[in-house]
Image: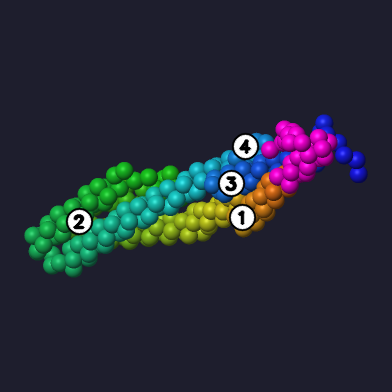
Amino acid sequence: MGIRINQNIQSLQILRSARGAQEALARDSERLSSALQINRGADNPAGLITSENLRAQVAGLGEEIQARETQINQTRVEDVRFDEVLNQLRNVRNQAVQSLNTGAGDATTRAASQASAQSSLEGIQQALQGSQAGELGVDTANVDNAISALEGIDLNTPQGAAQAIERVDEAIQQVSTFRGELGARQANQLEPEARQLAAQSENLQASESAIRDTDFAETVVSFTRNQVRQFAGLAALRQSNQSAQQRANLVTGGRGGNVNTLA
């Protein structure tokens, strides 16, 4: 092996390796501190593009999930609303039955039943104010018609009371059917859709995480390896520079010659 003075090739090679270890160590430190293995486009251009596309899909699914949850909450509100309507309808029916069974001469009792029934009908109208049932995908036409048919019922006569019972029974049937259809849509459509969208979002987030997030176990191993490489490189660089000094002493005959070495 020849002895060269102008260029310390061995030191240059060791320095290049040490710099590579230092750059890798800095990259590992950044990944550990940020918890991301992609911090800039240069880290993984293709991975960055895929990750951003996945993030956009997750954001869109989040909006859809929120819309389904809003519809579910609206359905629950309407269910409570129409439960109150049923309570009022049952009271109207009770008053009609009482009026029907009242003696022919007891006009006072029938008048009281009429007043109570009228109060319940007003309560139904109040309960239905602000209803958004028509926006939930269930037809409300039958319910609307049945409720409208209760206007003008008269419990002051047996015939009027009997007719009122028939109309109230029809209204109870229609409201109960509507609540059942509303509940079926919530249980069989809205809630399954919300769960499916949530599962899709979870899978997309898992895929995005696998691309973008730091694998701490793997990165810690890499960090430790690059630390050892850096320390070993610096030690080898010192040894190489000492060899260069020895060659300089050989050329100068040991008379205290000195050369600039790479550090």
Q: Return the residue at label 4.
A: 40
Judging by the rendered image, the residue that carries numbered circle 2 is 117
Nearest the camera: 146 or 244? Answer: 244
Q: Position of residue 96 (x, y in %)?
A: 22, 61
Provide the secondary structure element on which disc 4 rests.
loop
Query: Disc 2 versus disc 3: distance between alpha carbons?
Result: 77 Å
Name which residue type carries label 3: Ser
- Residue 140 in the figure: left or right of residue 224: left
| Other-residue count near label 2 (Cα within 10 Å), few / some / many at <14 / 14–19 / ≥20 | many
Sequence-earlier tag: 3 or 4: 3
Helix, strand or loop for disc 2: helix
Q: Secondary structure at mark 3?
A: helix
Q: Nearer the viewer, residue 55 or 155?
A: 55
| Distance from the alpha carbon under mark 2 to that under mark 4 | 72 Å
Magenta span = 238-263
Which badge, 2 or 3, comes first in the chain's sequence? 3
**Which residue of the protein is positioned furthest toward the top in this rendering?**
6
**Would residue 116 be seen by someone viewing this image from the given angle?**
yes
Q: What is the C-alpha distance between the residues marked 3 and 1?
A: 9 Å
In the picture of the structure, the residue carrying the numbered disc 3 is 29
